[in-house]
Image: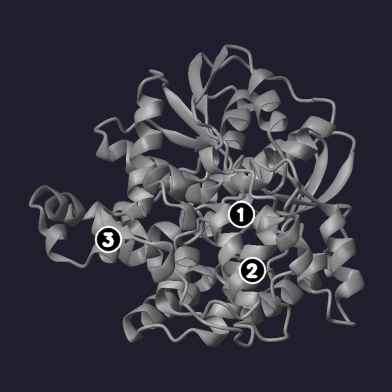
Amino acid sequence: MFTRGGEPRSFMTTVPDAKALASAFDAHHPPSKQIIENCVHCGFCLPVCPTYVLWNEEMDSPRGRIYLIKLASEGHAGMNPQWVSHFDSCLGCMACMTACPSGVDYGKLIEATRAQIERHHPRSLGEKLHRRFLFSVFTRPDRLRLLRWPLLAYQKSGLQSLVRGAGLLKLFPKRLQSMEALMPKLEKNEHVPAVTPAQGAKRRRVGLLLGCVQREFFPQVNAATARVLAAEGCEVVAPKDQSCCGALMVHAGEEAGALALAKRTIDAFERANVEIIVTNAAGCGSNVKEYGHLLRDDPNYAGRAKAFASKCQDISEILTDLPPRATRNPLRLRVAFHDSCHLQHAQGVRSQPRQLLADIPGIELVEIPEAAICCGSAGIYNLVQPDAANALGDRKAQLIVALSAEVVATGNPGCLLQLQSSLARQAHPIPVVHTIQLVDASIRGKPL
């Protein structure tokens, strides 16, 4: 017997008592049996799994979900609402992959399973409309750009302060409350030029993936990225025709839409003729590095996707590979560094951002306990599973507050939104910035 949200559950209520059934999965890329069999159910994943930490329920752990996938693939479990709920509750943070001694590629399992769910599981009308809204807005920079104006009016007019102060948000649905709480404080929209010349002798010609939320809600991060790369001798190309990379769709099982966006992204950067493609959003970075796998069936893109993925690097990777050229000026700050899950677990990038911060004179870098556990952002997770996301965000915020840090640095826009909201709930709204903003401030000799 396990509990989740205070409700008792038994394993048998999750898996129907059935004889041999046809597999619950169709023949289009079902979850790999080989990966399933690689799991020896040792339990090393349990202490780092956010949902297991919250609920202590086996079926909401990586090994429990893998067992459910195995049962469904063998025809002993159906794709019923309770079975699906265990996969909807997964953040896809990949912490289990870092912890796993057997090298189980859980990321490919969860993405394949979610694609099957979206093809075969009928969701409620409300759920369908909510997801359709999220994917039709957050994967479209042009629509996010239009959204800036009403959001700016809401913030600048004082209406936001009035709504929050009067407690009016409690009258709205929980998901709308979550969206409002995650809203960033919008700043000047700094556009990155199509080409930013290198300062001094050119060392690299790089492409910059602008992202969607990053481009419109955190334009200062892209501007800082371009400035730092230029200061380090890189010519920065930001193709204006680049689209969403498809990360949100891939991670949520929306395979067809993700494939189309991946192809458009490859096309745009092939025309740019760059040596390296730089990402500064961890979720986007983990996705584009897997384009070879995503487009493996397409004869026109399979080889091109592999070539594209081989060029992709996080901003911290390229900067630590290049011997520093630009002078770093002191920043007297106590900085808590938060590892984005899709940077540390999916991409295996941990030391590089820390090295960038350590190279800035005056910075005191402090580590946040439970670094392996997600903050609750996880793509659209905090918009579709707000209760679990808030619990994880509050847990992370309390650990940060205890460090008496002056600034929090991280490498993903979703984490920026989540941590800002969570720290505000703890009445401790310290600045949360992208790592590259600290590097940029140091190089420019300006306060953050």
Residue bearing mark 2: 70
Examine the rendered structure and indicate whether residue 243 appears above or below residue 64: below
Q: Is residue 8 left or right of residue 315?
A: left
Quarter of the image holding residue 221? top right
Query: What percent of the width, then of the height, locates residue 150?
Result: 31, 66
- Residues 11 and 180: in front is 11
Examine the rendered structure and indicate whether residue 289 appears above or below residue 27: above
Identify the residue at image location x=79%, y=64%: 34
- Residues 303 and 22: in front is 22
Element under label 2? helix
Element under label 1? helix
Query: What percent of the width, then of the height, locates residue 351?
Result: 71, 29
- Compute the Cα span from label 3 to label 2: 51 Å
Q: Amino acid at mark 2?
A: Lys
Residue bearing mark 1: 283
Quarter of the image holding residue 100? top right
The mark lying in front, picked from 1 and 3, is 1
Examine the rendered structure and indicate whether residue 75 appears above or below residue 394: below
